[in-house]
Image (cartoon, rainbow, N blue to C red):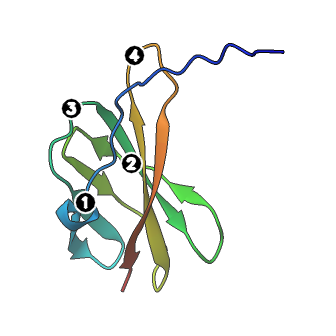
């Protein structure tokens, strides 16, 4: 029996880890920046202690603002990279942010 297997490429790429930066506005407010990406990017932070996600109040293709983060917690940055009419790519990074 011969199976016909079809492959397709959606050309979604990850955001380089060395392009991610964060800035502390205060102990519970953080601005996250990354290089401009050719596809639609959404970002969220995963609290490693509670496994709950935090979503930004402001988000564009290069920056996101997170408020009301839990003090003295560690967050992992995750990106959802998408292209119209294709499944999205979840990029779980090795970039961590510790709040004050």
What is the distance, in whole Å, between disc 3 and disc 4 at their CAs?
Answer: 12 Å
Residue position for label 4: 84
Q: Say which of marks 4 and 2 sits in front.
A: 4
Mark closer to the chain start, 3 or 1: 1
Q: Residues within 10 Å of mark 1 (few under 14, many from 20)?
A: some
Residue 30 appears in which quarter of the rendering?
bottom left
Residue marked by disc 2? 43
* SS type, badge 4: loop
Q: Tell me how far mark 4 sits from mark 1, CA to CA.
A: 24 Å
Residue at horizontal 46 percent and vertical 13 percent from the top: 85
How many residues crowd around disc 3 within 10 Å: few (fewer than 14), some, or many (20 or more)? few
Q: CA distance from mark 4 to mark 2?
A: 17 Å
Q: Is residue 82 visible?
A: yes
Q: Nearer the viewer, mark 3 or mark 2?
A: 3
Q: Marks 3/2: CA distance?
A: 15 Å
Q: Are marks 1 and 2 in contact (CB under 8 Å)?
A: yes
* Residue where numbered disc 3 is placed: 38
Give the image quarter of residue 25. bottom left
Q: Position of residue 49 (x, y in %)?
A: 62, 77
Q: Is residue 90 left or right of residue 100?
A: right
């Amino acid at each position: 029996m011969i199976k016909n297997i079809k492959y397709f490429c959606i050309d979604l790429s990850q955001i380089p880890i060395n392009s991610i930066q964060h800035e502390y506005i205060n102990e519970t407010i953080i601005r996250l920046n990354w290089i401009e990406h050719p596809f639609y990017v959404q970002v969220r932070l995963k609290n490693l202690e509670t496994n709950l996600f935090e979503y930004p109040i402001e988000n564009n293709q290069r920056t996101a603002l997170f408020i009301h983060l839990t003090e003295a917690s560690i967050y992992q940055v995750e990106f959802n990279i998408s292209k119209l009419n294709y499944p999205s790519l979840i990029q779980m990074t090795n970039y961590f942010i510790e709040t004050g």
